[in-house]
């Protein structure tokens, strides 16, 4: 049975499901979910993330993590990445922090990952990079100590619910079956003003903030999204397959589903637990403030002509307003007594 058949049978038996329920099944169904059997990254996958574009991204974040650890007083620390992709970001960050005295000895590395395929990729990328690396599916399994956290393109894949304002008030948009038995939305996308809510995102942020409040720490959330309600109140749920946009309801389990992140809601969730939140700022500004440009220039000094072109192109893609620099945002959460972090 395909995942589409499974979803249709479930709707016939139990009635329409929320958009969040559909997303959860499409992405993480144990047998047919997208993340269970796909490597979505790279030219052969469905999208490319910042760490795969340039090593500068992970190196800059590594330098930031090292600086926060020093500001925390060099404690024993859990270095956590949510949704680590192929492990590229963590590998680059660990390499960049080898020059921070005592950092590698003080940290244990913890990766939150549900995908068996990506776990193997991460293991390959990180083998020998640090003596204490472990994988978890639940944040509660992270050791209870100071926390340094990275979440790059993690929150955009968490299931959302959608609400549409019609003449008689607000209605939740559901996934149902049309007259021909095909998957369909209960309300058309252009029927009225759309509001999206990601309760999972707020729950994750609350868990992170509570841990930081108890043991200290700081972390970065990097993703594409907005600070407050979208100005045009449109839906942002999208599906990507082989680097092309496709119908969200087409072939569940075969395309990546994401939605823009509401950074205001995440910051509010952290503050409600007592944590401090900085930003969000743009990814372009963040990387530039932390020295991405001079680091690229230094690497280019010893690079071949082709490598130099690739490095300059990668930096532009990460920082330019017309590429990832403006759409992608960076939010920092930290213990309220932690010094204001670099980049904000």
Image (tube, grey):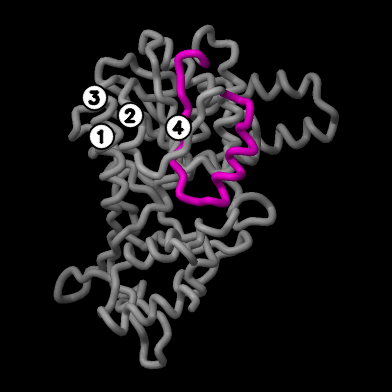
The answer to which of marks 4 and 2 sits earlier in the sequence is 4
Distance between mark 2 and mark 1 Cα atoms: 7 Å
Residue 140 visible, this orientation: yes
The alpha-carbon separation of the residues under discs 4 and 3 comes to 19 Å
Q: In the picture provided, is 187 more to the left or to the right than 307?
A: left
Residue bounds of the magenta highlight: 104-130
Q: Is residue 34 above or below residue 16?
A: above
Crowd rating for badge 4 (residues with CA inside 10 Å; few <14, some 14–19, many 20+): many
Q: State the residue position of label 4.
A: 110
Residue 17 in the image: x percent, y percent?
29, 72
- Report the residue marked by disc 3: 213
The residue lying toward the viewer, choosing from 120 and 24, is: 120
Q: Quadrant of residue 177?
A: bottom left
**Residue at image coords 52%, 16%:** 104
Disc number lying in front (1 or 3) = 3
Quadrant of image for the C terminus:
top left
Residue marked by disc 2: 333
Residue 131 % position (x, y):
55, 23
Q: Nearer the viewer, residue 149 or 324?
A: 149
User: Residue 189 at what x, y percent from top left?
Assistant: 36, 72
Report the Cα–Cα distance between label 3 and label 2.
10 Å
Identify the mark nearer the N-term, 4 or 3: 4
SS type, badge 3: helix
Mark nearer the viewer, 4 or 1: 4
């Amino acid at each position: 049975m395909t995942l589409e058949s499974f979803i249709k049978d479930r709707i016939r038996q139990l009635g329409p499901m929320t958009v969040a329920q559909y997303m959860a099944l499409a992405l993480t169904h144990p047998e047919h979910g997208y993340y269970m059997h796909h490597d979505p990254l790279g030219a052969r996958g469905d999208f490319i993330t910042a760490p795969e574009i340039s090593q500068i991204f992970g190196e800059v974040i590594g330098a930031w993590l090292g600086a926060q650890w020093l500001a925390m007083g060099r404690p024993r620390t859990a270095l956590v990445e949510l949704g680590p992709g192929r492990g590229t970001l963590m590998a680059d960050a660990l390499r960049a922090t080898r020059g921070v005295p005592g950092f590698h000895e003080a940290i244990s590395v913890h990766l939150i990952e549900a995908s068996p395929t990506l776990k193997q990729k991460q293991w390959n990328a990180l083998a020998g990079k640090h003596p204490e690396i472990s994988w978890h599916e639940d944040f509660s399994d992270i050791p209870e100590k100071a926390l340094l956290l990275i979440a790059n393109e993690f929150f955009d894949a968490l299931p959302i619910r959608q609400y549409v304002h019609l003449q008689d008030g607000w209605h939740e948009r559901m996934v149902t079956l049309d007259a021909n038995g095909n998957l369909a939305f209960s309300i058309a996308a252009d029927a009225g003003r759309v509001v999206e809510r990601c309760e999972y995102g707020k729950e994750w942020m609350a868990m992170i903030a509570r841990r930081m409040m108890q043991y200290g720490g700081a972390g970065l959330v990097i993703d594409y999204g907005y600070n407050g309600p979208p100005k045009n109140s449109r839906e942002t749920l999208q599906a990507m397959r082989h680097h092309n946009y496709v119908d969200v309801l087409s072939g569940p389990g075969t395309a990546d589903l994401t939605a823009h992140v509401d950074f205001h809601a995440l910051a509010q969730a952290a503050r409600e637990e007592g944590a401090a939140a900085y930003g969000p700022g743009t990814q372009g500004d963040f990387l530039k403030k932390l020295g991405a440009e001079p680091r690229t220039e230094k690497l280019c000094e010893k690079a071949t002509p082709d490598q130099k072109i690739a490095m300059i192109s990668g930096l532009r893609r990460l920082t330019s307003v017309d590429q990832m620099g403006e759409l992608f945002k960076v939010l920092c959460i930290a213990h309220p007594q932690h010094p204001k972090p670099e980049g904000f």
